[in-house]
Amino acid sequence: MKKQIQNCLRPLSVILFAFLFLFTICGDSYSQDAQTVIFENVRIFDGTSESLSAPSTVIVQENLIHSIVEGGFVSYSDYPDALRISGEGMTLMPGLIDVHVHMTFGSLSMIDMMNPELSLESLAPKIAEQSQQMLMRGFTAVRDAGGPIFEIKAAIDSGQMMGPRIWPSGATISQTAGHGDFRQPNERSRRFFGQPSRAELLGATFIADGRDEVLTAVRENLRFGASQIKIMAGGGTSSAYDPVDVTQYTFDEMRAAVEAAEDWGTYVMVHAYTPRAIRRAIEAGVKVIEHGQLLDEETMRLVAENDIWLSTQVLRASTPNMDPLRVEKRRPVLEGQARMWPLAKELGVKIAWGTDFLFEPWMNQEQNAYILQLLEWFTPAETLKMVTHDNAQLLALSGLRSPYRGRLGVVEEGALADLLLVNGDVLENIELIASPEENFMVIMKDGRIYKNTLPEK
């Protein structure tokens, strides 16, 4: 046990060092230094429009979209050293955004998590591989909704590892017996027995009870660079102790989290399904509801009236190797989501989309395909707007705690250059985005090209 604790406490930045060199080399084969890049003869989905633009030229300088010239030709003499990419009528669109990922837990299976020899050494290579693959699927920005993340984000931002921009939440904050209480049966309460659980040592969660402990947990995450705070306000389907219907955290505890986050200019998002939990969160000042599949109409109206975001997913009944207990706990949630999506749209709720894959790393390859499930309730233009522009608006709630400055989710002059060049018309055939390996010809993040399958001019 002592050895396990020592492993858990070892800084992840040190653990990453041994294998990041490999990913740096791999990254160089995809990525170019920021320079002037000119996309010629492209039709633009700008993140909000219901139709593509006329053939246009888009000029990227450094990490920004410098100018857009409709139907224009840019003289070689004006940009003699530019990299020119001939779009040949392809779609240029914003990078995809997923606002509910778990970069760590989405990279691990439940067998990995239950392994008594689990250590950060064993986690890091798997996370690095999945991070690179996520960027190669066209996801240039994500919001991490809980788990060990700060060192991974730092490695990506410094260019040591490939991956999307990350808005980190840090460790989830949960009451005892809440959705973030991941203790094994033999692990006793830290408060009574003095030993933090393995999940807490790994930076997965804070088990915090009472106003004082919640304040400390929030401030610890902010200290390490959290751009928003994630607390557990209700039961969940992937946790052992809490039924889906239970309400978690008292008003005073939840309000403490909101006050601490607001003092730092950011917000709290809550994991919650039920009307009771969500009403308490609204009263406490929470800005974002994660999930919400059991919302009734009256509570959904409160969400709309209070200008609160509903950040949610389209869930499947089960996936390969899913624990039978988890399948059973998901049943009412699945029944509720068929009502939630059209109701939220009808009432004008601000909706964001994410995947929330947990402990099933093989599911990550379906990240793009899951976007298509939105077509049951939204048009192709509405769907693409949600996973680009709208999701970027949610990221912007972090305000000054946002780790990146600039506008995302749009193709506009002055916006950050996170761009995809897609071989076809994504509004006429949105299924193109489900096969990124074949159809994403260029992937650009922050003005740097990480994939380019087209010949240079």
Image (spheres, helix red, strand yellow):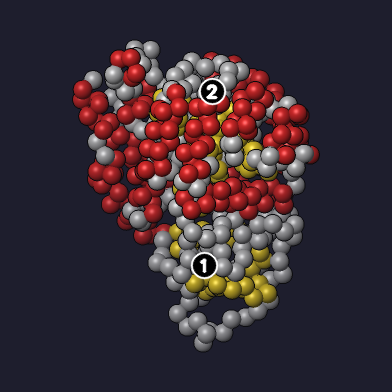
Question: Which image quarter: residue 343?
Answer: top right
SS for dot 1? strand
Compared to residue 95, the image places residue 347 above or below, namely: above
Q: Position of residue 360 (x, y in %)?
A: 48, 30
- Which residue corresponds to the image point at 24% horizontal and 31% vertical from the top-left? 7
Can residue 107 be seen at all in this image of the molecule?
no
Mark 2 residue crowding within 10 angstroms, few (<14) / some (14–19) / many (20+): some
Mark sitting earlier along the chain (1/2): 1
Drawn side of residue 36 relative to residue 55, left or right? left
The CA distance from mark 1 to mark 2 is 45 Å
Q: How many marks?
A: 2
- Which residue corresponds to the image point at 41% horizontal and 59% vertical from the top-left? 30
The amino acid at mark 2 is Thr
The amino acid at mark 1 is Leu
The residue carrying mark 2 is: 250
Q: Which mark is residue 64?
A: 1
Drawn side of residue 403 relative to residue 197, left or right? right
SS for dot 2? loop
Compared to residue 159, the image places residue 369 above or below, namely: above
Q: Nearer the viewer, mark 1 or mark 2?
A: 2
The N terminus, quarter of image: top left
- Which residue corresponds to the image point at 41% horizontal and 65% vertical from the top-left? 32
In this view, the residue in front, 321 or 390, is 390
